[in-house]
Amino acid sequence: MPTFTMRIFRGDTARGEFRDYRVEAEEGMVVLDVIHRVQATQAPDLAVRWNCKAGKCGSCSAEVDGRPRLMCMTRMELFSEREPVTVAPIRAFPLIRDLVTDVSFNFEKAKTIPPLRLKPPEPDGTYRMMQEDIDRIQEFHKCIECFLCQDVCHVIRDHEENKRAFAGPRVFIKVASLEMHPLDTRDRTEFVRATASVGLCNITKCCTEVCPEGIHITDNAIIPLKERMADSFDPIVWLLRKFRGQTTQPA
Amino acid sequence: MNGHAVSQARPPIAAAHLRKDTWWALPLAVVGVLTSFIVYSTWAALQNAHYFVAPYLSPFYSPCLSKSCLHLTLGRGLPEFTVPIIGVVSPALLILWGPALFRLTCYYYRKAYYRSFWLAPVACAVRDVKAGYTGETRFPLILQNFHRYAWYVAVVFIVFLTWDAILAFRFPDGFGIGVGTLVMWLNVILLAGYTFSCHSCRHICGGHVDVFSKSPTRYTLWHVISRLNERHPMYAWLSLGSVGLTDLYIRLVSMGVIRDLRLL
Ligand code: SF4
Ligand code: SF4
Ligand code: FES
Ligand code: FES
């Protein structure tokens, strides 16, 4: 049975260090299994957050060998026995202890999003949507709120001061899903520009790279939001809109 | 935003990154390729010679809008420019700002050079090299949001380059096909692939619509462009290569270094 050296971050904000644990891994085991084995056999006080072990709850986010990942979806086969495998907490957020961080930043940002404002119903009192109207936003609904995208985003990861202004990729897909909603009447472009500061994103796509749900965050949400923002200073779009009559109102 | 989670301390890990893979290889390759292209295209643009050999015109020198240039037919009926810089300065310099701005403001190239040249971030989960960061919120980077204007210009270029590729069938002795003809067609196809897979194109052609079922044509268009858009990075690199190599091919034929093989 392969034996790995797991180099796990232990400690809190006052004092922390990486500690090595030798642990056996059976075939098919994931990082979370190995962490649990460490917890069961060598470090009963090791703090780790998890829930579903199926890549669906978004709790077990960590940085394995420096890359943001879900521990429950990262197989040990990826790593070599010859080198230690480092497991660190997601670094963009305040540490609680060991592998557990406080991700409430993300929930606070989510509260700022202007909610859906429905169109009036059709004459028969119902709402109708066609499949093609919502295909695009269904991709965004796959989000499991693991916040790996928020963690990897250099805008806040490497520049703490931007946390006040910048909402982050997770928030942008939520905004995009409302903004592109066929029944919504709100215009969130000013929110996207001024409150969520989409301009801070330099579309370097790390959020997309780490998303365990494979959501095309940058291409399908952030860039379209930047383009919607650009509509407001495109005279051609302005003329076309004048021609057809404006359909959305500011948030 | 309340300060709750903002003010508390992060994990005390000092290392700029903990990655063990070869994350530096890709940015390094991008620096190599982009620098070579910029050096070659600047050199080629300054030559003001060997950009035309019947019936091929280098994409760096298209469109030829003055009688003083060597183009096959567009000279007819065109004004004889007497602006003093023409003839002194290479016409390529009057042309290349269009495609250059288009690529400079392209969402994909922005990603590529922000990572490789700006080092913000050089790779994911590797710390930014510079301390301060304002992204695209200030001048001059805020102007990146005008990318769509560069796209409007790029579409015009596609029209000209297609015209050039059509003329590449017209040899001095009549209709024909040479290796150069195929090179020019491949180049224009890749450039069109790049131009029509653009994110701004995707938005303008249909992405801005919220209720697709009410705009079926735009929906179809958006759908097709979205498929192309998935391959935008591939088109970006292939067309960059093809545009340089097309110029090189025509240049070498014109200089007599190689002979263009006539296929038909
Ligand atoms: S693409 Fe933008 S939001 Fe996503 S990680 Fe990069 S800077 Fe952050
Ligand atoms: S968008 Fe992806 S990476 Fe971000 S929170 Fe949702 S599932 Fe996680
Ligand atoms: S434990 Fe639920 S996503 Fe990993
Ligand atoms: S050309 Fe790349 S996004 Fe427009």
Image (spheres, rainbow, N blue to C red):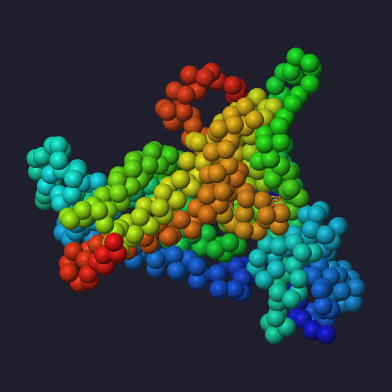
Residue appearing at x 51%, y 41% in the figure: B202
Relative to residue B107, is residue B23 depicted above or below?
below
Closer to us: B250 or B95:
B250
**Quadrant in which the C terminus of chain A appears:** top right
Relative to residue B35, is residue A59 depicted above or below?
above
Query: Is A76 on the left-hand or right-hand side of A39?
Result: left
**Quadrant in which the N terminus of chain A appears:** bottom right
Position of residue A150 measured from the top left corner of the image (x, y, whole percent)? 66, 52
Q: Quadrant of residue A250?
A: top right
Q: Quadrant of residue A138?
A: top right
Residue appearing at x 41%, y 49% in the figure: B192
Closer to us: A248 or A13:
A248
| Furthest residue toward top | A123
Residue appearing at x 47%, y 41% in the figure: B201
- Residue A195 seen in the figure: yes
Residue appearing at x 62%, y 49% in the figure: A217
- Residue B111 seen in the figure: no
Query: Is B3 on the left-hand or right-hand side of B249?
Result: right
Closer to us: B33 or B69:
B69
Q: Quadrant of residue A72?
A: bottom right
Position of residue B24 measured from the top left corner of the image (x, y, whole percent)? 51, 70
Position of residue A65 measured from the top left corner of the image (x, y, whole percent)? 67, 71
Position of residue A216 measured from the top left corner of the image (x, y, whole percent)? 62, 50
Closer to us: B26 or B235:
B235
